[in-house]
Image: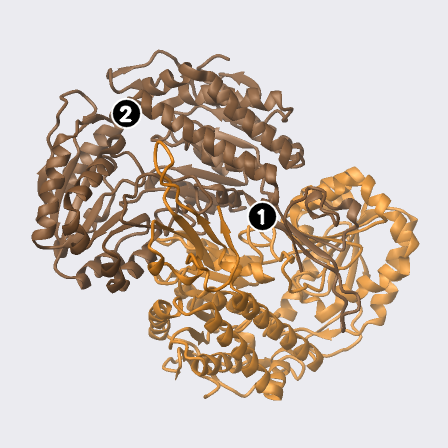
Chain colours: A orange, B brown
C-alpha cells in the first residue's frame, strides 16, 4: 500500500493531478503524506467495479459476509499503534479518544457480523398457499429483504473511525450485501487509507469480490458530487453539516433515477430542566452538563447546544454552578483550523445577537485551534424571535434560555427544527405533570433522554440516531444500531416459486434456522 | 352530506368558484352532480385541522384505532348499492368489479384493524440497563414506531375504492396514527365523497378527533401541489402515472423540510417465457395471458405489457394462440375519455415504431371509449435500441419481443426501467439453468412470479407492491400488505425513562401483551 493513493477495489491508483495533505491541528502544521484526489475516470472505475461486485456479493451468504466483517474488525485491530498515531496526527484528539472510537468501530462491525450470523434480519415472511380459497386461490408468497446495490458513504470529520471508512454506514451497507465506495474525508485521509487497506485485506482473505469496497481521496466537493450523480450508485450515507447533507439530497433528487440519501446532520439537542429536580441535584447536573457540553471540544452531533428552563433562582443557581464547572475545564484542540475558524465565526455571529449574555468564554490554552467552552444566556422571547439562535454552533457552545412560562417553553420547542435528541431533567412527578412538554419534545426529535445527557450514543437495537429534518434526511431510519441496515435494503416477493429456486432464507425447511414468520 | 362539497374534517364546504362534473364513459356523457374544487383557504383549514387532530389521534390506542378502521369498513358496506352505482357511473366498470374492489377495500381495512388489535407492529425493542458495565454503564433504552404526522393521499384513477379515498394508503396511514387528507380523484369524485362520508361517520361514532380525515375535490393539479408544499404535511402517498408521481416527488424534495413521497407509478411488468414450459402448455398460457392482458381494459399497474421469449416455432405457436384468444375477448370500456384518448395516442406512437408488427387490434364494440386488446410484436435488437418501446402504454396493450438469444434477453432485462413485477414461465429445470435471467429480473422488480400472471395483487404480509424507480419512488417500502404501514412511521427511542412515563407498548409489564424484543 502507498498511503497517498486511492483504493479502486483492490488496486492502488493515483493518476490525478490534484493533491492535498492532512493537517495536525495541535502542532498547527501540515502532515507529511501527499494524497492524490480521485479522478473522474477512477471514480467511474470504482463504480463499475462495485456494480460488477454487487452481482457476486449479493449472493454471498450472511455467514460469509459475517466472516468478512469480523475480518475487517481484526485487520483494524492489527493496525494497532500505526492507526492510533495517524488518527491523533490528523485530528488533534487524544490517544484515549482514538482507542475509544476504535473500540466503538470494532463493536459496530461485530454487531453487524452477529446480526448476519443469526440471520433473521432479512425479515422472512411466508404466506402459505391456499388453493381451495374462493373465488381465487391464494398463491404461495414469500418476502425477504434484499440489498439495493452500490452505496456511497461520506466519511465524517468528527468520527474518523466510527462514522467514516469502516464506520456505521459502511458496516451496515456491507452487512446488507451492498458494495461500498467511501468518499474519504480530506481531514483524515491517512486514517481513512489505513482503514481502507484493512477492509481490502479482509475482503481478500475472506474471498470477497474485487470492487466490494473502494476508498476515494477527495479534497473538495467534486468527487462526492460525481458519485452521488452516478447512475449505478443506488444509495448514499452521509454524516456532517446540514449544508453538505442537503446539497447531496438535492443532487440525488434531481437524478433521472432518484436514490435514497440518508444524511445525519446538525442538531442542537435541546435540554429541558424542570425546577424540582434541578433544585434537588443542582451540582450533579452542573457537573454532568459541563462534561457533556465540552466533551471532545463539543464536536459531537449530540452536543447539548440549548438548555431551556424557567427563569428564577433555581436556574440561576444551576447556571452559576455550570459556569464555574466549565471554567475548570481546559480548552481543547478542535479537529482542524477550518473547523476552529468556523466555530469562531459562528460563535461571533451568535454572541452578537441582541440580548445575548456571554457567561464564560475564556481560553485556558493559548494555542492555535484550541477552543474554550462557551456558555451564553438569553431570555425566552428574544430566543423565540431570533432564528439565528436556533442554528447549531458546532463546537463547545451552549445557549441557556430563561423561559417566562412552561407555555413559552412549549412554544419554543414547537418552533425548533428537527433534532437528534432532547433531554428532560425532572422528577418523575414533574415529568408526569408536564406531559405537553414531553409531547412537544417528542414531535421534534428521534430520542428522548430522561435525567441524563444526550452525548453517548449507545450502539444497540433500541437506539434511534436520526430524527425529523434537518436532524436527518429521512426520519424513518436510524444511523446507529443494527436497524441501520434497513436503509440499504428493499423488500422482495417471490410468488409461487418452487422450493429449489428460493433463496435459503425462504425455503420451506428453513435450512438457515432463522425466524420465518408463517401466515 | 351534499355530494358536491369538500369534507374539511367533519364540515362540508364549497366556497370556491371552480366546479366540475364526473363522466360516465359507457354512456359517453357527463354525470349530474357538480363538485366544487377546494380553495386555498379550505386546504389550509384541512391541514390545520389535521395538525391539531394529530396531537390527539397519535395518542389513541391501537385498539381504539382498530375500532375506527373497522367502523370505516362497516360504513362503506352500509352504503350498499348507492356506492356500487356511483362507482359504475363514474368508471364504466361493471358491477362485479365494483363489488370485487369494495371487497378488497374492506379486507384491507380489516387487515390493518387486525394488525392494530394485535399491536406488535410497533416493533417494541427493549435494551435493558446494565449499570455495572465498564467503562460506562449501559442505560435502559426502548424503541418503538411512532406516526409521522398528517399524510396526504392522492386517489388513483384505476382503483376508485381500493387505492383511493379509503384505500391502502389511507388505511395504512390512519392505522399508523396519522391523520389523512385525500386529494380526491376528479374522475370519481362522487365515489370519493360517499366513501369520505363513511370515514367521517366512522370517526364520529368511534370518538376520533375532527380533522383526522378530510376529502378535497380537485379537477387540476393545484390542490395537490398546495397540499404537498404545505409545511405541516409530513408525508405523501400517490398511485398513478410516472409524470404525476415524479412531479410530486420533485415538489416534496424542494421544500425547506423535504418529506417522504411514496408514489406507486408505471410498470410494463416483463414476462419471460422459456420454451420447454411454453411448449408443454401453450394453450394454457395463451389463455391465461389473454385474460391477464385484457382484464379491466388493461388498466392495472400489474398489466403484463411486455413478453420476452426466444424467437422460434414455440413462441410463434404461442403467439398465434394468444392472438386467437385475444380476438375472442370483447373490447371494454375505459375509465374516462381522457384515459381512452391517451391510450389511443400512446398506442399509435408505439405502433408507428420501426419494425413493429400489429398482430391484433380489432374493436369488437364500436362505442366511444371502448378499447380493443392489442398485441404487437418486434425483434429483440429493435426493441433494445428503441427506448420509446420500453414505456408503458396504459391499457390493454402488450408487446411480444422475439429475442435472438438468452444473452440478448438478459441485456434487454438489464436495460429496462424499474418494474413492479416480473414473471417467469419455465419448467423448474429450465429456471435452474437460467439463473442469470432470474437474477437480472430480480434486479429490476419488487415481485417475481413463477408460472403465473402478474395481475392479482394479494393483500398479505408477504406482498411487495413497489420496486426500483420508476415502479415506485422508494423501493424500500411496499404499497400493499400490512408492511405498508411502515411508510408513515419513524422509530423513536426513550432513554432511561421511568416506567410510568413510557408508552404502554414499552412498559416493563407489557400490559398490551405484544411482542417485545428484549436484549
Res. B375 image quadrant: top left
Q: In front here: A192 or A130?
A: A130
What residue sits right under mark 2 in the picture? B336
Q: Chain of mark 2?
A: B
What residue sits right under mark 1 in the picture? B490
- Relative to B204, does residue A126 appear above or below in the rendering? below
Q: x%, y% of residue A302?
A: 68, 60
Q: x%, y% of residue B50?
A: 59, 31
Q: Which mark is residue A82?
A: none
Q: CA distance from mark 1 to mark 2?
A: 38 Å
Q: Mark 1: few, some, or many residues within 10 Å (few <14, many ≥20)?
A: many
Is tag 1's residue or tag 2's residue first in the polypeptide sequence?
Answer: 2
Both labels 1 and 2 in a single chain:
yes
Q: Pick the quarter of the image with the C terminus of chain B.
A: bottom right
Question: Position of A397 compared to B317: left or right?
Answer: right
What is the number of callouts on the image?
2
Q: Secondary structure at mark 2?
A: loop
Amino acid at each position: 500500500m502507498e498511503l497517498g493513493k486511492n483504493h479502486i477495489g483492490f488496486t492502488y491508483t493515483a493518476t490525478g493531478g490534484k493533491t492535498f495533505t492532512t493537517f495536525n491541528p495541535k502542532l498547527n502544521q501540515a502532515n507529511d503524506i501527499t494524497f492524490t484526489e480521485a479522478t473522474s475516470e477512477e471514480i467511474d472505475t470504482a463504480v463499475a467495479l462495485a456494480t460488477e461486485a454487487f452481482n457476486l456479493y449479493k449472493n454471498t451468504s450472511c455467514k460469509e459476509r459475517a466472516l468478512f466483517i469480523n475480518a475487517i474488525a481484526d485487520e483494524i485491530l492489527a493496525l494497532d499503534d500505526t492507526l492510533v498515531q495517524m488518527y491523533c496526527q490528523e485530528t488533534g484528539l487524544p490517544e484515549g479518544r482514538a482507542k475509544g472510537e476504535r473500540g466503538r468501530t470494532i463493536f459496530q462491525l461485530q454487531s453487524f457480523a452477529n446480526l448476519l450470523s443469526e440471520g433473521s434480519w432479512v425479515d422472512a415472511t411466508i404466506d402459505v398457499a391456499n388453493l381451495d380459497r374462493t373465488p381465487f386461490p391464494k398463491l404461495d408468497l414469500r418476502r425477504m429483504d434484499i440489498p439495493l446495490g452500490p452505496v456511497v458513504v461520506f466519511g465524517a470529520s468528527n468520527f474518523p473511525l466510527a462514522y467514516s471508512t469502516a464506520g456505521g454506514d459502511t458496516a451496515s451497507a456491507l452487512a446488507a450485501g451492498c458494495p461500498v465506495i467511501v468518499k474519504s474525508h480530506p481531514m483524515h485521509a491517512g486514517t481513512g487509507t489505513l482503514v481502507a487497506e484493512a477492509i481490502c485485506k479482509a475482503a481478500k482473505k475472506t474471498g470477497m469480490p474485487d470492487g466490494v469496497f473502494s476508498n476515494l481521496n477527495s479534497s473538495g466537493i467534486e468527487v462526492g458530487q460525481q458519485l452521488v450523480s452516478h447512475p449505478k450508485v443506488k444509495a448514499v450515507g452521509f454524516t456532517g453539516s446540514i449544508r453538505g447533507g442537503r446539497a447531496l439530497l438535492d443532487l440525488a433528487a434531481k437524478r433521472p433515477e432518484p436514490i435514497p440519501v440518508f444524511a445525519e446532520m446538525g442538531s442542537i439537542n435541546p435540554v429541558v430542566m424542570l425546577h424540582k429536580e434541578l433544585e434537588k441535584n443542582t451540582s450533579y447536573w452542573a457537573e454532568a452538563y459541563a462534561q457533556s457540553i465540552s466533551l471532545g471540544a463539543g464536536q459531537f452531533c449530540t452536543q447539548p447546544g440549548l438548555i431551556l428552563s424557567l427563569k428564577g433562582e433555581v436556574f440561576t443557581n444551576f447556571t452559576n454552578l455550570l459556569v464555574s464547572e466549565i471554567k475548570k475545564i481546559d480548552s481543547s484542540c478542535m479537529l482542524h483550523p477550518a473547523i476552529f475558524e468556523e466555530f469562531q465565526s459562528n460563535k461571533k455571529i451568535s454572541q452578537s445577537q441582541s440580548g445575548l449574555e456571554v457567561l464564560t468564554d475564556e481560553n485556558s490554552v493559548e494555542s492555535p485551534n484550541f477552543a474554550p467552552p462557551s456558555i451564553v444566556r438569553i431570555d425566552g422571547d428574544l430566543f423565540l424571535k431570533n432564528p439565528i439562535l436556533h442554528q447549531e454552533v458546532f463546537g463547545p457552545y451552549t445557549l441557556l434560555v430563561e423561559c417566562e412560562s412552561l407555555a413559552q417553553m412549549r412554544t419554543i420547542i414547537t418552533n425548533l427544527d428537527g433534532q437528534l435528541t432532547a433531554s428532560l431533567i425532572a422528577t418523575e412527578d414533574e415529568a408526569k405533570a408536564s406531559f405537553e412538554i414531553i409531547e412537544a419534545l417528542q414531535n421534534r426529535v428521534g430520542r428522548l433522554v430522561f435525567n441524563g445527557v444526550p452525548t453517548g450514543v449507545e450502539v444497540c437495537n433500541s437506539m434511534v440516531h436520526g430524527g425529523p429534518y434537518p436532524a436527518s434526511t429521512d426520519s424513518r431510519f436510524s444511523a446507529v444500531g443494527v436497524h441501520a441496515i434497513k436503509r440499504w435494503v428493499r423488500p422482495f416477493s417471490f410468488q409461487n416459486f418452487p422450493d429449489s429456486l428460493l433463496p435459503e432464507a425462504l425455503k420451506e425447511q428453513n435450512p438457515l434456522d432463522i425466524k420465518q414468520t408463517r401466515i
